[in-house]
Image (cartoon, grey):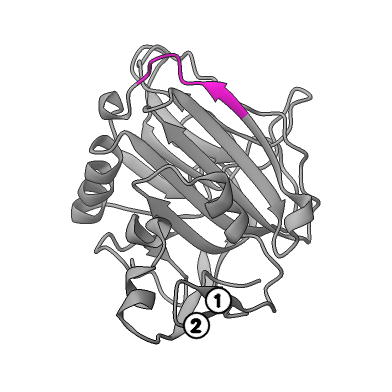
Amino acid sequence: MFKRSQLIAAVGTAAILGASQASAALVHEYNFDDLTDSVGTADLTLNGAASLAGGNLVLPGGAARTNMASATGASLAELAGTINGTNELTVVVRYNTSVQQTWSKLFMTGTPGDQNLRSYIDLTPARGNGQGAGITLDTTNTGGDFGPNSLPVIAAGTDAIHIGIWDETTDTMTVYNAIDGDSGSLSTASLSMAGEDLANMAVSEFYVGAAVNWPDPDFNGTVDQVQIYNHALSLSEVQALVPEPTSLALLGLGGLLAARRRR
């Protein structure tokens, strides 16, 4: 599995100015060589039996909210500021499932509580009740969560990418998933946000690999990377995240090269 593009050469000012809008809007990134936020300062903490190995967050599954990475204190406040302070949000997770468990979360943030208090967004690689992979939204604190959830579930043991986009500008939330490094496997679905507003979502918990709400099992597998953008990635920007990892691309003028770093 590969991380995001690393710039290895730049020729001329024009090439530098040609950096993508997506890169400019990347505000948090976790590559799991450690728990550091390599773009912001919202570092994570390990919980339970979660560990780091080989540049991955290793998650053994388990009961809800037992084994995961979380943000607390100033890190949680920074992430809450990002989520509440934008009207366009994209979350990208690269992962590999060891044991497929319905309803386990790659990412979830929000506030736990009863049906009249909770609010959240999440990325779920395999939903239950005959549904597929998807994302969820509930910012009205009514327990009425919804989201596009019809994508194919990617088989355990496969490097994969799951992307959630919440865009108030178009009142649309969109989910993508793909086999990592196979652009031909990219699937997508969209649904209206029904006027919901990210600014209204209370963010008191932030988890990678666990659910804020519900007794959903923790994710069983590895997470290679998490990226958060304060920008709704376009289709072309999403497609650029999923090419064959061995390829090199010219970016901008002057032959700016990008290479994928493989783990």
**Disc assigned to residue 250:** 1
In the rendered image, is residue 61 in sight?
no
Residue 41 in the image: x percent, y percent?
24, 64
Relative to 203, 98 lies left or right: right
Which sits earlier in the primary sequence, circle 2 or circle 1? Answer: 1
Residue 200 in the image: x percent, y percent?
27, 24
Question: Which residue has dot 2 on it?
Answer: 255
**Disc assigned to residue 63:** none
Residue 263 is inside the magenta segment: no
First to last magenta residue range:
190-196
Q: Residue at x 27, y 59 (%)?
A: 42
Q: Residue at x 34, y 41 (%)?
A: 205
In the rendered image, is residue 29 in sight?
yes
Q: Specify the amino acid type for callout 1.
A: Leu
Disc 2 is placed on an element classified as loop
Relative to 155, 186 lies left or right: left
Residue 172 in the image: x percent, y percent?
49, 26
